Amino acid sequence: MLDLQALLTSISDRIYHEADWGQPAQYIPDLAEIEPAQFAISVCMADGATYSAGLANQRFTIQSISKVFALIATLGRIGDQLWARVDREPSGTAFDSIVLLESDKGHPRNPFVNAGAIVTTDALLSGREPKLALAEFLHLVRAMTEDDDIHINGAVARSEQETGARNKALAHYLASYENLFNPPDLVLGTYFHQCAIEMTTIQLARAGRVLAGLKGSPRVMSLNHARRVNALMMTCGHYDGSGDFAFRVGLPGKSGVGGGILIIAPNVASIGIWSPGLNFYGNSNAGTRAAAYLTQETGWSVF
Amino acid sequence: MLDLQALLTSISDRIYHEADWGQPAQYIPDLAEIEPAQFAISVCMADGATYSAGLANQRFTIQSISKVFALIATLGRIGDQLWARVDREPSGTAFDSIVLLESDKGHPRNPFVNAGAIVTTDALLSGREPKLALAEFLHLVRAMTEDDDIHINGAVARSEQETGARNKALAHYLASYENLFNPPDLVLGTYFHQCAIEMTTIQLARAGRVLAGLKGSPRVMSLNHARRVNALMMTCGHYDGSGDFAFRVGLPGKSGVGGGILIIAPNVASIGIWSPGLNFYGNSNAGTRAAAYLTQETGWSVF
Amino acid sequence: MLDLQALLTSISDRIYHEADWGQPAQYIPDLAEIEPAQFAISVCMADGATYSAGLANQRFTIQSISKVFALIATLGRIGDQLWARVDREPSGTAFDSIVLLESDKGHPRNPFVNAGAIVTTDALLSGREPKLALAEFLHLVRAMTEDDDIHINGAVARSEQETGARNKALAHYLASYENLFNPPDLVLGTYFHQCAIEMTTIQLARAGRVLAGLKGSPRVMSLNHARRVNALMMTCGHYDGSGDFAFRVGLPGKSGVGGGILIIAPNVASIGIWSPGLNFYGNSNAGTRAAAYLTQETGWSVF
Amino acid sequence: MLDLQALLTSISDRIYHEADWGQPAQYIPDLAEIEPAQFAISVCMADGATYSAGLANQRFTIQSISKVFALIATLGRIGDQLWARVDREPSGTAFDSIVLLESDKGHPRNPFVNAGAIVTTDALLSGREPKLALAEFLHLVRAMTEDDDIHINGAVARSEQETGARNKALAHYLASYENLFNPPDLVLGTYFHQCAIEMTTIQLARAGRVLAGLKGSPRVMSLNHARRVNALMMTCGHYDGSGDFAFRVGLPGKSGVGGGILIIAPNVASIGIWSPGLNFYGNSNAGTRAAAYLTQETGWSVF
């Protein structure tokens, strides 16, 4: 029988032993200086137990993982209307690419590339004050986690706001195709704050329970919505490294440039991983390897 | 409890009732004239039983579904060396697009777009006579199906050979980047013949059993290889409609322009569907809907 | 001998008779409502004489023609340093395309596509107040024209500022590649004001005399600079319609979305044309035809 | 007064002194081994005199310069009908790029990129035997040159035929859009032979006299056609280096990968230059510099 605690510990040991960390994201000043040799993994099981190894109480900004929560919040608010504004296809291009937006006439490929996430946040705003939308958003994440000790790192949010020229370009470009209904600055302000939510791997794993359909997880979304979000995480969750993640890990996942990864093993487990050094695609380098080790040992691949 | 036979019959009835067939592929003369109002579905279960509805004994050319079998054959022959020549990422472009090949310097995005399939077939040839490679290929498909009554439709193969200008362009383009080791004409001859294999939905479902990991299925590949092929089918199996198929159906699948779809429910079932009318992305229109109905009713989605 | 006055009158008559006007630019509110059935042409000759036909005293915003004057001003200020930030090649894409900026890493193809013009204006600003740069700019245009009755239409400038989402996207995108040194909003404010300069065709023709190297024209730039600006107008002056303009007209020219065209016949004449209806490429529809008629009759083509 | 002979000699001396040759084209085996430190220049003047310096009797394959002669031959045969199949715009991409062909649906940007030249040759063939079309083509070049000692280098033609995978891809791609009427192999055979015509710089300069509209040049085309060919050479003659050539040289020109450049100074001179080392864009490195020196000294720029 699987001794999950022993397995997580051995994976953590292996990751530290390999010492192949990658480099933290350089374009966000507050992230650039983080020590890359850090690792954490947490797993919530169907029976309610949570197992962890490494720095599982270390907070990090979830960055693009917030796109999953924003998608859930927006689907809850406007449902399938969102798909009139964002497609559901892998893009084959980098997370911040603007190229396809031109041929696609301002219609982003999926809610997990930056352009699609900006449209999703715009839909979540719906003309409301950013504060109100952010409060609702934070409330959702806390409810999914059943933990109110989750907060936004204002310094990181402001740091991104000052340096996020590429995201500003995307927002104005979307506006030029009338696929942004709120002022670009308001949308981006909301977006940068949502990205700057800080969580631990324990909290991240707990937040994913409802997506994994684990018993006893808070009822914040239908099973049908959860399945569809998982499908999008599988095909689009790792940008132009999504195919490779599916190939190597075999589970839906969503990475963030802060080094976090949320991984869902439907009906089995919800997994949070963190290591701030990134690989070529902008996904956690050690974290991706840890995910592969985990599924190799557990056979949790959906395939 | 699930009455699968009744379900398949009701899906078939619904498809015929909806009468929303799409148009058969126009660019292959032998396919263009097929009556679109045809449908078949077959499902192999873990207990060895096979259920069908519609024209389950009607043969059709499997076309791009053959890319799955070619990938299995080539992985069996050269293993992971293939990945030095083909990537594993969704392309975000049409099945026959040449655009990314230029920026990617002749390295196709995955083995299921035409360029990647041509490289896969080239690797399968390995300097051998096309006849020999085709014989091995046909042998594999028959072994997977446990049925020797599977043949190549020579007329369709020749018809594609005469009209396949786009594929010829792809092959010569790959050659210009030295990512084709055999003469383009030999590779394409082999490729067009492999695409022209005729199967019924019963045979297609049976061929997929090993990918689904069903007990008693012929031992032609490792579980590890099967999982990885399934992962590729999930992220890349429906070209630029892959994300939508994952979203709506939730299972790995591979479509062919002949109207066939092979769908894998890991550990549960292997499914063959056919209806020759196509949707916008070049995937079977009624077949894709039938797949969605099936997973909605059975809950077989991996998510 | 050429009776230029008679020729211009006959061209004007022909344009009104053909009544093939095209549609004014729709994306700038103040331009969208202009009556399209208007035409003017003015020609300055080497002997100092100016000939006109049509509404040669009607003011219109010169829009992208201002890119020529901004280029002259910037070359005068920083010389060939500009070419480290902007290339000199035709783009093969639309004036407001962002696609090539991604593969070219924020380095615009030429100073006459919007992205290149924004970089040129940024270089002109050089950290100064927009007011100061605009004053210098206006001073240059007036000096070239030898006419101080040239002003900026503030309403049009503001109208563009409110609606110019695409240009904002370009500016922020350039900033993301650190190819914008001043704040995007300041650069765009300057840019929109420079585009909103109003001139008549008489003034436009007079402003071009120095580019044509006509005797007695004000000494605002070297002959060498003038030739190079003319070369850029020839290869890049009409966006993705530049080749066609060279083919049909055979002279360097620069069009504006306000319907103006500045055309240079080196050593012979400087020509201003206006008609606010646009063709497919965003160049004056009747104006382009008038230019072709003029060179056919005069043989002024440089080829 | 201009002492042209002295100028050409000094340019040749300077080129040899600078010894900045570039590298000969590597993808055509017969070209790859050529000694790069070679240079020749010849100029035909309006008075019938021809001046030369360097290796002006050395034969070289004209390669893409043949596209100019093919365009003249095809315009002579089918006139403006050609423009229904090829556009007249700079492409902004490399000479052998296939990317724009996909978005442009098989319609090449201009007759001087490879795809456009292949369509032009296809139009010249018009269902005739390649031998016949080549004979007509060679006859035209000899007539323009008034020299029958111009021949095709069969070895080079065959060498390209064996290695021209990229051109084969372009031809089949054009065929897939039904913009090739003859079998791709026949068209390419003709194309490779036309590219393998050998000329000296003296012959090249003489061939260009009609384009320059020099008195006494053979009447093989109308002045109107000549002007339009010159316009295309200006905007599209040096691939994605066309803007730079116009900027630095100020004359229409067409380069070949064999190191030749044909340059037209309308009404003044026709110029042939050769040096086999290439620059980044695939144009003669020393030859382009020599052209710039020539126009700087003579003031022959059309601008």
Image (cartoon, coloured by chain):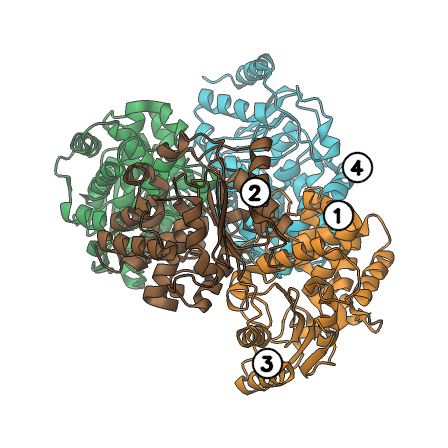
Chain colours: A brown, B orange, C green, D cyan
* The disc label shown at residue A290, or none: 2
| Rendered view: D8 above or below B233 | above
Nearer to us of marks 1 and 3 is 3
Tag 3 residue = B1
Label 3 element class: loop
- What amino acid is labelled 3 in the image? Met
Residues under numbered marks 1 and 3 in contact, where contact means CB atoms less than 8 Å apart:
no
Q: Decide: few, some or many residues near mark 1? Use Cα within 10 Å; few <14, some 14-19, many ≥20.
A: few
Q: Nearer the viewer, residue D190 or D166?
A: D166
Nearer to us of marks 2 and 3 is 3
Residues under numbered marks 4 and 3 in contact, where contact means CB atoms less than 8 Å apart:
no
Residue B295 pos. (x, y %)? 56, 72
Residue at figure coordinates x 60%, y 25% from the top left: D42
Number of numbered tags placed on the structure image: 4
- What amino acid is labelled 4 in the image? Ala
* The disc label shown at residue D155, or none: 4
Which quadrant is the C terminus of chain D positioned in? Answer: top left
The picture quadrant where one finds residue D95 is top right
* The disc label shown at residue B79, or none: 1
* The disc label shown at residue B135, or none: none
Distance from disc 1 to disc 4, alpha carbons, whole Å, reads 41 Å
Which quadrant is the N terminus of chain D positioned in? Answer: top left
Give whichever of discs 1 and 3 has the lower sequence position. 3
The picture quadrant where one finds residue D278 is top right
Q: Decide: few, some or many residues near mark 3? Use Cα within 10 Å; few <14, some 14-19, many ≥20.
A: few
Distance from disc 4 to disc 3, alpha carbons, whole Å, reads 76 Å
Residue at figure coordinates x 55%, y 49% from the top left: D99
Marks 1 and 4 share the same chain = no
- What amino acid is labelled 1 in the image? Gly
**Image position of A23 (left or right of B144):** left
